[in-house]
Image: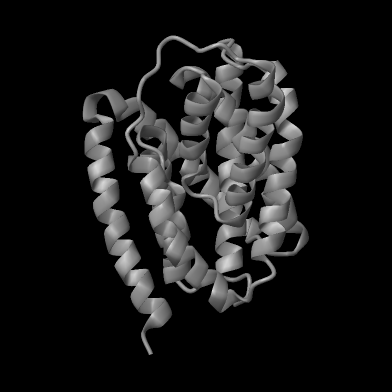
């Protein structure tokens, strides 16, 4: 497939990225929507992953700035975890590019339930932070960043949720602190992954720039309505939508 899209495909992708941005701002899991839609309209899987990373990187920058202004970023942890996150994201992306398009599509299909699980897993709200020992700082944090960075580079959707859970449970950060640090590490893994995809020529840049705009608009709309609608309702809609996407994608990839 070339770098040209028919108008109706562009319209579908714009609406998809608006919806995924909306859902991501409220319940997380936006990548679980836009990547399958990319595949369903006929985009090569590696281009779907690469272009989605382009959009994700931009959104994470804005979120990180907000957390940094609020003073929730632990820069000591950030400096320790960032190298591992970058290495993990880079290696994960290089690994997925070793497969051909047909195999990547099937890998995405099998990993979708993993991403869904990350979004719907309950999170215990730990309001009091635990002691952050040197072992956690210099061993646990880099391990988390490398493993989840590899997953983010290899696939991506659900990585942010996994980061929050891991930093909360294994390191002892509160959920707010974990969410803030997740933006740091997730941005590093997403950006390093995007660079690898872009270097390999696996990004729809022209369409991607347009999709970034719709993703941002979706995030703004979603965050504005989050209090009125509630994340539980959004998650219920998300699970239903993902189930339909999963069935459709399975039929497309495996129907003879």
Between residues 126 and 61, which one lies in front from this camera angle? 126
Between residues 182 and 145, which one lies in front from this camera angle? 145
Q: Position of residue 144 (x, y in %)?
A: 61, 36
In the figure, residue 101 lies in which quadrant?
Answer: bottom right
Say whether residue 5 is visible: no
Eyeballing the image, is 241 above or below 86?
below
Q: Position of residue 256 (x, y in %)?
A: 38, 90
Eyeballing the image, is 255 above or below 128?
below
In the figure, residue 65 lies in which quadrant?
Answer: top right
Q: Position of residue 252 (x, y in %)?
A: 38, 78
Q: Position of residue 155 (x, y in %)?
A: 55, 55
Eyeballing the image, is 27 above or below 136?
below
Q: How is the image coloured?
A: one colour
Say whether residue 101 is visible: yes
Residue lying at the far front of the rendered structure: 135
Judge left or right: residue 62 versus residue 120: right
Which quadrant: the N terminus?
A: bottom right
- Residue at 47% x, 68% y: name it: 39
- Residue at 59% x, 10% y: name it: 71
- Residue at 46% x, 37% y: name it: 161
């Amino acid at each position: 497939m070339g770098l040209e899209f028919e108008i109706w495909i562009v319209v579908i992708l714009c609406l998809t990225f608006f919806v995924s941005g909306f859902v991501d701002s409220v319940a997380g899991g936006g990548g679980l929507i836009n990547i399958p839609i990319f595949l369903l309209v006929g985009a090569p899987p590696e281009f779907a992953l690469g272009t989605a990373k382009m959009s994700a990187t931009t959104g994470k920058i804005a979120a990180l700035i907000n957390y940094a202004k609020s003073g929730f970023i632990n820069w000591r942890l950030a400096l320790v975890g960032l190298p591992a996150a970058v290495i993990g994201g880079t290696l994960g992306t290089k690994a997925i590019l070793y497969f051909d398009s047909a195999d990547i599509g099937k890998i995405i299909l099998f990993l979708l339930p993993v991403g869904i699980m990350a979004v719907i897993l309950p999170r215990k709200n730990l309001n009091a932070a635990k002691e952050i020992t040197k072992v956690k700082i210099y061993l646990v944090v880099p391990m988390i960043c490398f493993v989840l960075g590899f997953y983010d580079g290899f696939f991506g959707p659900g990585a942010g949720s996994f980061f929050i859970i891991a930093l909360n449970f294994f390191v002892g950060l509160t959920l707010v602190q974990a969410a803030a640090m997740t933006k740091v590490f997730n941005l590093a893994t997403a950006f390093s992954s995007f660079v690898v995809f872009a270097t390999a020529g696996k990004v729809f840049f022209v369409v991607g720039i347009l999709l970034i705009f719709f993703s941002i608009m979706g995030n703004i709309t979603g965050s504005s309505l989050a209090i009125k609608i509630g994340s539980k309702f959004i998650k219920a809609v998300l699970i239903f939508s993902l189930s339909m996407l999963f069935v459709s994608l399975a039929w497309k990839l495996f129907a003879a």
